[in-house]
Amino acid sequence: MILSLCTWNYQYLYKKMMLHQLKSSVLYCTRIGRASLSSKTFVHVKFSRKIDKTNFFFRQLFDPVSCTYTYVLGDINTRDAVIIDPVLEHAERDAGLVKELGLNLIYAMNTHMHADHVTGTGKLKSLLPGVRSVIGKASGANADIHLLDDDVVTFGQHQLQAAATPGHTNGCLTYICHEQGMAFTGDTLLIRGCGRTDFQEGSSEALYSSVHKRIFTLPDHYTLYPAHDYKGLTATTVGEEKKYNPRLSKSLQEFIKIMENLNLPYPKMIDKALPANRVCGIY
């Protein structure tokens, strides 16, 4: 009798445990994005799986003219890859690197519609057929895929979460790779600085909120990779910026006052870059 009772309890607990694991395995249901020529929303259900953190390719590239960083991320096993914030003048360099390393570039992504350089996404699509352009829907720019807040981009077994971080522009996104503990912040958060807020739908209050609610809430050890740096620095961390950023470590009112008194010159490339970037850099 005791043995039968123990067996029944074990079977009951086992079934309960398995049911809990099944429920826990469904991480989220997310919109992958809308193709620019279709209103259909693609919905994918993601299941949890063990991620091999060593199966990850990362390369940081640089444009010395606009001081723009471009990033190539890939799955070493499947060879699927994405590129973030490519620059038109370096599209052939980037395509050459992708081919040389045997990567399959599936997405050319932008963190926002840039005003200081022309994006290389359109050129990359012509050099590497099959590449799809990606940008935030709120940017107003043309693209094959428009992302909304918390959409997920998958390449191989790796994923990037798109977090809406408006303020520099309405369409700014920060791409977060939780498995690697890294995020690509675009112009929203720079190393010891941030993007300007005095043009192109800029809002100091919105930028401050974006950084404090969507970036500074990430774990302190997460490495942050900006779209630009003008002092030769390449990366920072959430913990560093929370402590040392001379603008965003201040109160909201202090931050707004700082931004109002920057007295920055009119962007040199804006009149050329914005019209081109609205059409994926092909003009």
Image (cartoon, helix red, strand yellow):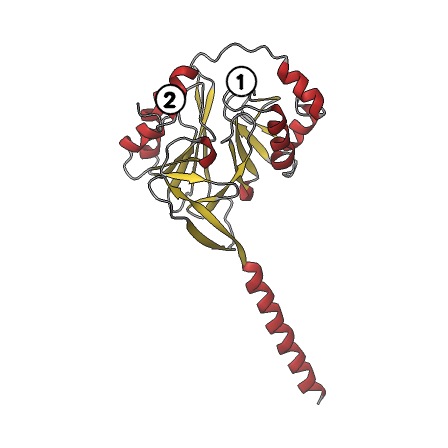
Residue 221 visible in image: no
Q: Secondary structure at mark 2?
A: helix
For mark 2, what is the residue?
275
Q: Position of residue 178 (x, y in %)?
A: 55, 43
Using the image as rendered, state which of residue 59 and residue 202 is in the foreground.
Answer: 202
Query: What residue is rendered at 72% in x and 86% in y?
Result: 2
Query: What residue is rendered at 47% in x and 45% in y?
Result: 158
Q: Secondary structure at mark 1?
A: loop
Task: Give the position of the N terminus as an image quadrant.
Answer: bottom right
Using the image as rendered, state which of residue 89 and residue 221 is in the foreground.
Answer: 89
Using the image as rendered, state which of residue 58 and residue 106 is in the foreground.
Answer: 106
Q: Earlier in the sequence, mark 2 or mark 1?
A: 1
Q: Which mark is residue 232?
A: 1
Q: Position of residue 40 (x, y in %)?
A: 38, 48
Using the image, determine if residue 230 lies above or below residue 145.
Answer: above
- Please state which amino acid type lies under the numbered disc 1: Gly
Tell me: 135 left or right of 229: left
Q: Position of residue 95 (x, y in %)?
A: 32, 30
Query: What residue is rendered at 60% in x and 65% in y?
Result: 20
Tell me: 58 left or right of 120: right
Quadrant hosting residue 89: top left
